[in-house]
Image: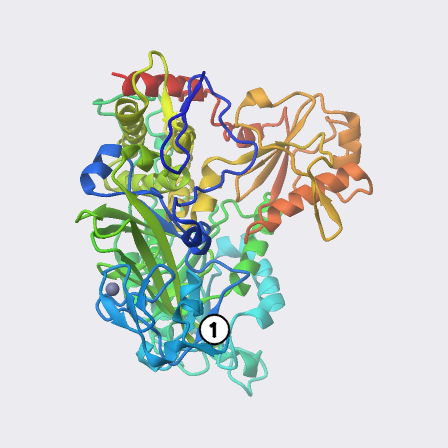
Amino acid sequence: GPFGRLTVQGGESRAVNLLQNRNICPTEPVEPPKANLRDDLKKVNTSPDLFRCTLTTLPQNQNLLNKCKLPLGIVLHPFKDLSHLPVITSSVIVRCRSCRTYINPFVTFIDSRRWKCNLCYRVNDLPEEFMYNPLTKSYGEPHKRPEVQNSTIEFIAPSEYMLRPPQPAVYLFVLDVSHNAVEMGYLHSFCRVLLDELERLPGDARTSIGLLTFDKVLHFYNLAEGLSQPQMLIVSDTEDVFLPSPDNLLVNLQESKEGPALQVAHKLMTPTGGRVCVFQSCLPSLGPGALKPREDPNQRAGNAAQKFFSRGEKEKDVQHLGPATDFYKRMALECAGQQIAVDMFFMPGQYTDIATLSGVAKYSGGCTFYFPGFHPVRAPAQVTRFERDLRRYLTRKIGFEAVMRIRCTRGLSIHTFHGNFFVRSTDLLSLPNVNPDAGFAMQVSIEEALVDSSTACFQAALLYTSSKGERRIRVHTMALPVSSNITEIYAGADQQAVVGLLARMAVDRSIMSSIRDAREAVINACIDCLAQYRSSVAGQQLGALMAPWSLRLFPLYTLALLKHPAFRLGTSTRLDDRVNTMNQLKALPLAANIMALHPHMYAVHNLNDEGALTIRDQIIPQPPILSLSSERLSRDGAFLLDDGEGMYMFVGRSISVRFCTDVLGTESFAAIPDVMFELPELDNADSERVRSFVGWLREQRPFFPPLQIIREDSRQRMVFLQHLVEDRSESMFSYYEFLQHIQKEACK
Ligand SMILES: [Zn+2]
């Protein structure tokens, strides 16, 4: 049969013939693999939502890693919002004297007074204080302390963890008020949301806030107490910016209820550090940091005539993926040095050179948001998304003046980092701000064989100042088994983490070399891995493409990556759109990356209560996830596609009149408007089912995805259809053709 079974100790070690199992896509979200550890260790291991490894069984040495042809790396979401987090207030934080690892559930107690470090194997003494257990209020049971019962934990740090008194929360908003920006009308949305949420900005009595606006000149606002209204101060010399009145420009929140603009923001914030938030609507054209339009509209697709694989041919690739000037990177590094992070909200009507401008967020631990074509009338969904995203942005928690260090068991070594930060030393990341929606990844190599223990660990420690002025350390520790058996390594592979890491590597490669090179590297990773699996595990079966069960979606995800707006060629893609998706692949958590690559699609015209969830008295239908193929669509159906950032409902031309009237609130299919962004609240069971399902999906993530309703005969249909990655398109293979190609190459 198609499923050959191999027996390996532990782990899922089935092999599957992909060519015979084309409907490989699961109908429920893919569960991350659990490391094959002893049950007691498995129970305390860190959540895969926070910390994952591409290989949940680690190869014992680099040779074995090289042989299996999979990238070794970790992906983490270290500051994710948690519903449960043990917080420890302790006068002493127990750490290894040699490698500074925090005591954790995977250490060994030699006796009741000594513990052996699981990263460097040094034996350490336990301090007297550790004998007391604050949870059980008893003495003498160090292994029951919360530090060794939880792999994710937060410490309140004593004074030796600070270089200066904890900084207050400081927020500076830098607003583009050029003609362009005023016309597009984002200021109205911004002011309304800021006013709504002012009370909810994270902080305490020391929190301060400032405003700076710019067009051809810079405008400061003196918000000092005692003035009847804010005083506007104008600085027109953009070559030599100075602060007109350093006091009162940043004011205490409780008492008073680009290019050059960035330089001023930097000067203003230098004494405290904090968060600068820049709203930019067009290409900066004046003063230092001015940029020129560089996009060639004829090259948006790369070379349109290019075939899927055309090795060796010198064809034009997409240009200008990297920055035009290092002005913004230098600016970011200066900011990072002063504990200032810069976040960018891009609302471009036309090319804005995000490749250059986003550098300021990239190297300062900031983040970027992108609302192309923002317009209250022409693009109401962008306005909704802007307002919801801004709300989340303003009210989510924040850490200031942070550093993150990743330690790993002796023999392992981290060599490349991905995310928004500044690398201070080989394993220390400087994060002027840390936000709960940021993701990171690191590539790992094995420098010394892992022979000292049957498990190895990674520990991430994030030291930051909370918005309440507390120095805190959040620690995550992940344990993984080590094996010398290649079958076990394959059985433990985490296909989503593998693709997430490959995507980040491909972004770097696109910028350093070319998109063509990056695409080839991704395809080769897939081919080489399956070729190796065939020769060392599955054996040679004529006409089969065998994959380990753990990697059954690897080729599908690889194809999705090649069709993603970041890496696609042959389909017109605006340069800023492309660069924005690359930035997101680098800086978002893995779960968001996977949703963007391989969205979830559901039929919603026939929702029922079978298998539904009931949450707060509301019934939430649970339709199966469909594979991303037009074969799954039907003329009489409605299909919802969710890519994490947006939702699209595709309505077939033979949809029932009942669905139109009861769910969409229109008389017929033909009456569905061209621009429709929300479902009406209609008082019937079908409408309630669809709305409760959409609402439930939205609750799963921090940012609000807008919904767009698309008629089958609408010009907008490509917005939906381009996500169907299993289909053949003009310039790219279908999933089946891709499998055949992989099979041909892997079985050479
Ligand atoms: Zn140690």
Q: In the rendered image, which quarter contains the N terminus?
A: top left
Q: Which amino acid does label 1 sit on?
A: Ser
Q: In the rendered image, which quarter contains the C terminus?
A: top left
- Identify whether 545 is placed above or below 144: above
Q: Name the residue under label 1.
A: 467
- The residue closer to the viewer here, 440 or 263, is 440
Few, some or many C-alpha atoms within 10 Å of disc 1 (few <14, some 14-19, many ≥20)?
Answer: many
Give the image quarter of residue 457: bottom left
Q: In x, y percent, where is residue 729? A: 45, 21
- The residue closer to the viewer here, 2 or 76, is 2
Q: Is residue 593 left or right of residue 416?
A: right
Q: In x, y percent, where is residue 437? A: 46, 56
Q: Which residue lies furthest to the right in this view?
A: 683
Q: Quarter for ligand 1?
A: bottom left
Identify the residue at image location x=30%, y=23%. Answer: 534
Q: Which residue lies furthest to the bottom in this view?
A: 226
- The residue closer to the viewer here, 70 or 382, is 70
Q: Is residue 532 visible?
A: yes
Judged from the image, the secondary structure of the residue bearing numbered disc 1 is loop
Asked if the residue at label 1 sits under 8 Å from ligand 1, the reply is: no
Q: In x, y percent, where is residue 331? A: 29, 62
Identify the residue at image location x=74%, y=48%. Answer: 618
Q: Which colour scheme is used?
A: rainbow
Q: Is residue 320 visible?
A: no
Q: Is residue 236 left or right of residue 620?
A: left
Q: In this view, does 318 lie to the left or right of 690?
A: left
Q: In x, y percent, where is residue 229? A: 57, 80
The number of numbered discs placed on residues in the rendered structure image is 1
Identify the residue at image location x=21%, y=59%. Answer: 426
Q: Which residue lies furthest to the front in this view?
A: 111
